[in-house]
Image: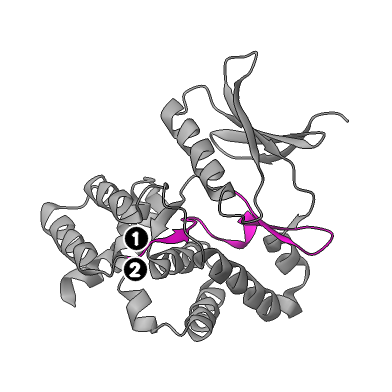
Amino acid sequence: MAVKEIAVRSNKTVYRDGDKCYKVFSADYCKSDIFNEALNQTRVEETGLFIPKVHEVKRLDDGRLAIVMDYVEGKSLQSIMDENPKKQSELLKRFIDIQLSMHGLTAPNLNKQRDKFTRKIDASGLDATTRYELHVRLDSMPKHSKLCHGDFNPSNVIITEDDRACIIDWSHATIGNASADTARTYLLFKLAGKDELAQEYMALFCKKSDTAQQYVDQWLPIVAASQMVKGRPEEREMLSKWVDVCQYE
């Protein structure tokens, strides 16, 4: 089977080569981040969750680094939702069930979510007063040790031909508070302009998990500040509005 390009991002490209998948990073990509992603994924493997198994981090002939893992045949849940708009609510319920199953696990050797948020707040470019308010809020939030994806959206769930759900892309994985992970998913829907889906997701998640929406909302300024580190000008105004909530509550 010929090598096939299956996904392209600004700083990485994913290829299929038979039963293997190569996630190839740009030459200037931080080496420690590549190895950290591979380590995250192997640590999540140990939970027994269905994810692509990592085989190695390999230097290619052109000098770039690649994470080599199993190729999982299937379609992304996002593609299935796009193809079946009338089933969106039903598919959203499944998406949440998959997330809840993940949150029911822990991986003690993963980085702590709280430590990651602390670093992101410091690097957000926000003023000192706002950063202080965010750190105070973060310190006040309950400490948990649940498996959190950090970028959980329908594009990162692959549904196989035998209807199993495989979660991919573990570069942001941590252990921490599931409601922070939920706030992050809500934020991703909002940033994608999917406001109605975001609201439906939030309501369904809170109902299924018996979580107060006000509690999840408490995490939104923190995850918004964390997203600012990506430095996307088109997102800054929306993110700033969420961060500002922290100062007026």
Q: Is residue 21 left or right of residue 163?
A: left
- Which label is found at residue 224? 1
Identify residue type, mark 1: Ala
- Magenta stretch: give its range: 144-168
Residue 83, position in %: x, y?
78, 67
Q: Which residue is mark 2?
A: 220
Instruction: Report if the CB atoms under discs 1 and 2 are less than 8 Å apart.
Output: yes
- Disc 1 to disc 2, C-alpha distance: 6 Å
| Residue positioned most to the right | 1
- For the N terminus, the quadrant is top right
Question: What residue is rendered at 57% in x and 15% in y?
Answer: 63
Question: What residue is rendered at 11% in x and 58% in y?
Answer: 129
**Number of other residues with Cα within 10 Å of mark 2, as a class: few under 14, some 14 to 19, many 20 or more:** many
Q: Nearer the viewer, residue 199 or 168?
A: 168
- Which label is found at residue 15? none
| Above or below, 191 relative to 96 | above
| Above or below, 20 relative to 64 | below
Quadrant of res 21: top right
Q: Is residue 39 left or right of residue 80?
A: left
Q: Is 41 within the magenta?
A: no
| Residue positioned most to the left | 129
Q: Secondary structure at mark 1?
A: helix
Quadrant of res 131: bottom left
Q: Is residue 153 left or right of residue 134?
A: right
Identify residue type, mark 2: Leu
| Above or below, 56 relative to 170 | above
| Above or below, 148 relative to 86 | above
Question: What residue is rendered at 56% in x and 54% in y?
Answer: 47
Residue 216, position in %: x, y?
37, 75
